[in-house]
Amino acid sequence: MEKISIKGLIEAGKIGEKVTLKGWVRTFRSNRFIALNDGSTIKNLQCVIDFEKFNEDALKRITTSACLSLSGEIVESQGKGQSIELMVNDLEVLGDSNPDEFPIQPKKHSLEFLRENAHLRFRTNTFSAVFRIRHAVAFAIHQYFNENGFYSLHSPIITGSDAEGAGEMFRVSTLDAKSPPVTESGDVDFNEDFFGKETNLTVSGQLEAELAALALSKVYTFGPTFRAENSNTSRHLAEFWMIEPEVAFNDLFDNMDLAEDFLKYVIRYILEKCDDDLEFLENRIVQEEKNMKAELRQPHALREKLRLVTENDFERVSYTEAYQILRNSKPNKKKKFEYHIDEWGVDLQSEHERYLVEKHFGKPVILYDYPAKIKAFYMRVNDDEKTVAAMDILFPGIGEIVGGSQREERLDVLQNKMKEFNIPEDEMFWYLDTRKFGTCIHSGFGLGFERLVLFVTGMTNVRDVIPFPRTPKNAEF
Ligand code: 4AD
Ligand code: MG
């Protein structure tokens, strides 16, 4: 008998075919109808059993999340909402699931509860939809770069440099934590450590991607990054995935064009390929928001929100323009912002970013030319010498989703900048070498993968779009 997935079966719709299906029970009702799901699609297949054919013991074992193998014939469905069903001749319980102990009942559970049961939450419709979409987003990203002449670059996960300054780092060490070797001055002696120096988990693959871009022209990294910040928000993870393209000969505006084209491509791909899952998640949000005040509800249905992004130009606004908008905004004048906007040069907080995106422009915004003081050392200094060629992309409901810049390619300017930022030149000789030997303008950006998946799925907490979230005080599973 042919082995086939539920997705394949529904697509083929072959009436009269004899098949074996393996999957997990979503529901079992009237001792007759099993809704079987194998994860290949959000859709369950209705499997009909003639209860007189099976003994009572077998029927008792058909419980929520039990794993079954069902064989029989595909027939046209009598019921509503599906075109085909399986008339079961043969039933085998592959794995029992005790309904008194299985934590996820066929009722509505809170996302917090499911997070505590992250090892089993894949069995729910919501999370299987989220993780199918997560896969599709990753696939579309690789496809976009492949179609556009980029090379995938595996930048190191363990790094000996901490110059990026993107956040606190996690140390990687094999030294005895209780009694590490010490130097004469009493410091931990990292010469004795595995790599003979202090090493950490990377916060970004950018600096290495730059080295490769100055030879391969167009590269991108797609890897895990680690930040030991104590940020307990719905947007931050201690371990997250980042996509970092880096392109030789691109200036800041080419960089914006690339980021916008790339994001639209990926979202369009999801709209095209994941409609069933999007529809499910869209309805889920409508249910969730039923009892909410109108102003708290999402302004657009999920797929409409995604289409608005793919069909409209992102707004491009300089930091200085954004600063003026914010300074003159109602919430600022009425002192409603937690962080008052007063002097030019302040860092923008997420409340400001969200005001710009959600209230003022109502669409994705690319903010560029930030004050040099609040951005990293490697960003290219503009002619005004006060700002750098940085850009952040802000999305509705998310805030910052992309951070990038044109890089400082002038050796002397970069060296001065490093002095200012207290970055020792000898530790970064390799980075400076690219500016010594055939330097050129180049640009890149970093996209937070989970933030994009958050946007696309309409979920509200980044912990619900990564299989096993790592956050402060939490590394379960
Ligand atoms: O803005 P960030 O820190 O930029 C960089 O790391 C640059 N090296 C990127 C580059 O130019 N190649 O991070 C980039 C993006 C952010 O815009 C955000 O979407 C995401 O990474 N991000 C996080 N996502 C989840 N949890 C965190 N703690 C994140 N920190 C940053
Ligand atoms: Mg940033």
Image: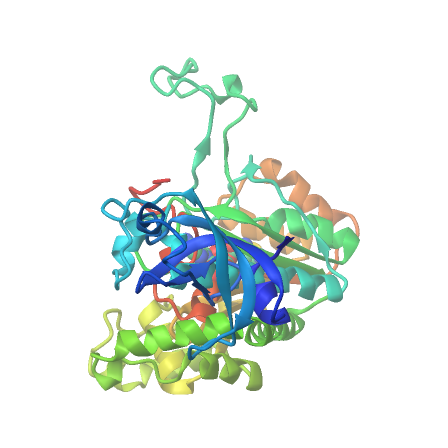
Q: Is residue 373 visible?
A: no
Q: Is residue 15 left or right of residue 288?
A: right
Q: Residue at x 65, y 63 (%)?
A: 443
Colour basis = rainbow
Nearest the eye: 77 or 39: 77
Residue 406 picture quarter: bottom right
Which quarter of the rendered picture does the C terminus lie within?
Answer: top left
Can you say whether 205 is above or below 4 in the image?
Answer: above
Q: Is residue 124 left or right of residue 69?
A: left
Nearest the eye: 446 or 35: 35
Can you say whether 396 is above or below 129 in the image?
Answer: below
Q: Position of residue 307 (x, y in %)?
A: 52, 83
Residue 248 picture quarter: bottom right
Q: Position of residue 37 (x, y in %)?
A: 46, 59
Q: Position of residue 436 (x, y in %)?
A: 74, 48
Q: Residue furthest front?
A: 52
Q: Is residue 280 left or right of residue 139?
A: left
Q: Residue at x 45, y 77 (%)?
A: 78
Q: How many numbered marks does the figure carry?
A: 0
Q: Residue at x 72, y 49 (%)?
A: 212
